[in-house]
Amino acid sequence: MLEASQVGLPRHVGIIMDGNGRWAKARGLPRTDGHKRGAEVFELICDRCADLGIPCVTFYAFSTENWNRPPTEVAAIMDLLRHWLKKAQEREVENARKGIRLRFIGELEGLPEDIQSLAQDAQEHTRTHSRTICNLAVNYGGRLEILQAARHLAAQCQTGERDALTLTEDDISAALYTPEYPDVDLLIRPSGEQRLSNFLLWQSAYAEFWYSNTLWPDFTAAEFDRALADFARRGRRFGGI
Ligand code: FPP
């Protein structure tokens, strides 16, 4: 099995699953069918990450701005999450064999209560799996994440637990939703859009971006591998020369 450190694989891949609505529209289907197919592709790519031994992958499933979509579409995405989380319970043995650990980032308290509890169960049951963290960003906003971290640190400064003048970048990283994850190495956005859309703003400071015109429901493991091969060829300087 290939390991991230051996072949220049990214330690953390961020994926913006975009283009579901356009995929459905092109087929005369309701937008929700695009999300349904998108959820299947999400599983496929998560498995591919585990096959390859990529330590961490974060999928953007629902942003804090996505609440502005029609209620039926929001409900359909929540139903997909619910369904997948219930299925994850049934696939516990398979997840253990593959070494997939499930995690969630975002304001989970804003989600329907049953999804919160299913998400907590999934995190608990897969806690010891150590090959790949499959991280879902749900009700997630990058600016909100930074704001929450700032509030947390400010409160600690107020009580005297910390000194504002000695705060470091590492202190901010540690106060985010992702304290134990490496920064994003590779950021993939299909569907022709070239925006970050409030996704992992702090963690993507030195990410390599990879775009394609494929709509997410048509995205394949082969295309994912092409993104990885491209990433492996890039020279990263992190501001140096
Ligand atoms: C963006 O495409 C996609 C979303 C806002 C939702 C993504 C959600 C899923 C793929 C399903 C989540 C469920 C699981 C189990 C992970 P868009 O709708 O904005 O596409 P468009 O730009 O073509 O309209």
Image (cartoon, rainbow, N blue to C red):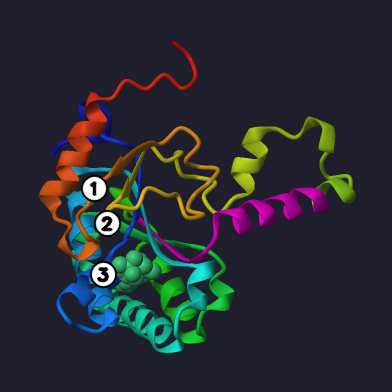
Mark 3, secondary structure of its residue = helix
Residue 167 at x, y percent in the picture: 75, 35
Relative to 178, say whether 18 is above or below.
below
Local packing at callout 1 (Cα closer than 10 Å; few below 14, some 14-19, many 20+) is: some
Ligand 1 within 8 Å of the CB at mark 3: yes
Task: Specify the segment rendered in magenta.
Answer: 134-155
Mark 1, secondary structure of its residue = loop
Quarter residue 32 falls in: bottom left
Q: Sequence order check: which comes first, mark 2 or mark 3?
A: 3
At label 3, the amino acid type is: Arg
At label 1, the amino acid type is: Ser
At label 2, the amino acid type is: Ser
Whether pointer 1 and pointer 2 mark residues with C-beta atoms closer than 8 Å, the reply is yes
Residue 209 at x, y percent in the picture: 35, 39
Quick check: is 191 in the magenta stretch? no
Name the residue carrying label 1. Answer: 212
